[in-house]
Image: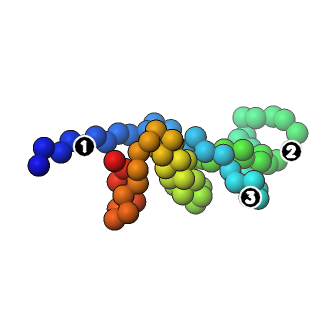
């Protein structure tokens, strides 16, 4: 049929999106960091969080749509 396709990989994919405003995520500080307090509040998603894959998917979909790509009705992972 003469179709062409492209795929890619995003390095540090889960580090691109912000944590949702209504959601507070706290992590323990690494032992090497010596500033007041025991925990840090995250502003960005990290690997290992349950929210990270969904947040990155929303971020990626938004960016692809701004590049004039359309999401397939039959397979939401397919953009054309």
User: What x and y, as percent, mark residue 1?
Assistant: 11, 49
The CA distance from mark 3 to mark 1 is 37 Å
- Can you identify the residue that label 2 sits on? 37
Foreground mark, 1 or 2?
1
Quadrant for residue 77, please give it.
bottom left
Could you tell me which residue is drawn at 48 percent across and 46 percent down?
Answer: 65
Q: Residue furthest bottom?
A: 74
The secondary element bearing badge 1 is classed as loop
Tag 2 secondary structure: loop
| Residue found at the far right of this picture | 36
Residue 15 to residue 19: above or below? above
Position in image of residue 38 (x %, y %) = 82, 47
Residue at (58% x, 60% y) in the render: 50
Q: Residues within 10 Å of mark 1 (few under 14, many from 20)?
A: few
Which of the two discs, 3 and 2, labels the residue nearer the N terminus?
3
Q: Mark 3 = which residue?
A: 23
Residue 4 visible in the current orientation: yes
Q: Which residue is mark 1?
A: 5
- Nearest to the observer: residue 71 or residue 19: 71
How is this picture coloured? Answer: rainbow
Q: Percent from the top left, x then y, of residue 71?
A: 40, 54
Q: Residues within 10 Å of mark 3 (few under 14, many from 20)?
A: few
Q: Earlier in the sequence, mark 3 or mark 1?
A: 1
- CA–CA distance between discs 3 and 2? 20 Å
- Look at the picture and state if 76 lies above or below 3: below
Number of the label disc, if any, that sits on residue 61: none
Using residue 74 as the reference point, say whether residue 27 is left or right of it.
Answer: right
Regarding residue 56, the answer to whether it shows in the image is no
């Amino acid at each position: 049929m003469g179709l062409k396709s492209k795929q890619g990989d995003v390095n540090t994919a889960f580090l691109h999106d912000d944590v949702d405003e209504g959601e507070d995520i706290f992590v323990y500080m690494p032992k090497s960091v010596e500033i007041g307090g025991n925990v840090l509040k995250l502003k960005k998603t990290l690997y290992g969080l349950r929210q990270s894959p969904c947040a990155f998917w929303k971020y990626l979909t938004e960016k692809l749509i701004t590049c004039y790509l359309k999401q397939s009705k039959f397979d939401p992972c397919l953009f054309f």
